[in-house]
Image (tube, helix red, strand yellow):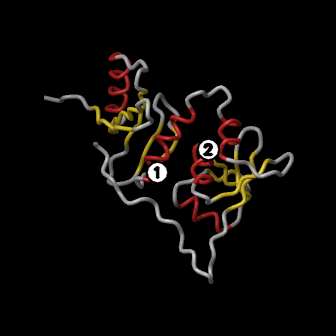
Amino acid sequence: MILESVPQETKPPNDEKTPFTPWEAVCDSRSTYIPYRPELMELRDRGFGDLKGNKLVLTAYESFYLHEKQRVVITDKRDKHELTLRDLVRRFSVGKPAIWIKYLVYRDLRDRGYLVRESSKMFDFDIYGKGPMRRLISIVYEGGEASLKKLSKLLVFADRERKELILAVVDRRTDIVYYTLSSLHV
């Protein structure tokens, strides 16, 4: 495996004096957000969300991850009932059939200690941390199509941006193997 392993993200101390209380988040039809409080900077410093006005807006992957790690409790904006992880996945997967597979890669990278952001370009994620090199993640599904032409385009773009290209190969059992793709410069 190319990416080095690190210990799982530790949960905050949970002693009797300062019990951990999950953040209260709200989910509307398009996004999940937490109303702003100064304590939210802890989440922001850990690479979660974007501050927009008086809200910390979370991506679908951040919502899934923080919900699964029991760091947030998410309620529906309309009827105020608490949403399960399954509810969130259903809500955000409309028109995005691969969202769960992409989330599995996101979760694996976060658990390894990387800061993960959705890529606005032709890649799935940008990752930061563990050294000065930024990395671009492209997900390849076992049995899916990954043409050499597409891989070549990804590699040319990564080289131009001076970033490392990582292929996250997800097999049928949802095991993930990472490969670094680079060009040979003579």
Above or below 29: residue 46: below
Residue at image x 36%, y 16%?
A: 147
Return the residue found at the far left: 186
Going by the numbered disc 1, the residue's amino acid type is Arg
Q: Secondary structure under badge 1?
A: helix
Mark 1 crowd level (few <14, some 14–19, many ≥20, 10 Å Cα)? some
Residue at image x 65%, y 46%?
A: 85
Q: Which residue does the numbered mark 1 point to in the structure image?
A: 110
Going by the numbered disc 2, the residue's amino acid type is Thr
Distance of label 2 from label 1 (alpha carbons): 14 Å
Q: Nearer the viewer, residue 174 or 124?
A: 174
Label annotation for residue 59: 2
Q: Nearer the viewer, residue 50 or 100?
A: 100
**In front: label 2 or label 1:** 1
Return the residue found at the far front: 173
State if disc 1 and disc 2 touch (CB < 8 Å).
no
> Is tag 2's residue or tag 1's residue first in the polypeptide sequence?
2
Q: Position of residue 133 (x, y in %)?
A: 33, 47
Mark 2 crowd level (few <14, some 14–19, many ≥20, 10 Å Cα)? some
Q: Is residue 133 left or right of residue 77?
A: left
Q: Is residue 108 left or right of residue 165?
A: right
Q: Secondary structure under badge 2?
A: loop
Residue at image x 28%, y 32%?
A: 181
Rendered image quadrant of residue 25: bottom right
Rendered image quadrant of residue 142: top left
Label annotation for residue 151: none
Q: Quadrant of the C terminus?
A: top left
Return the residue found at the far bottom: 17
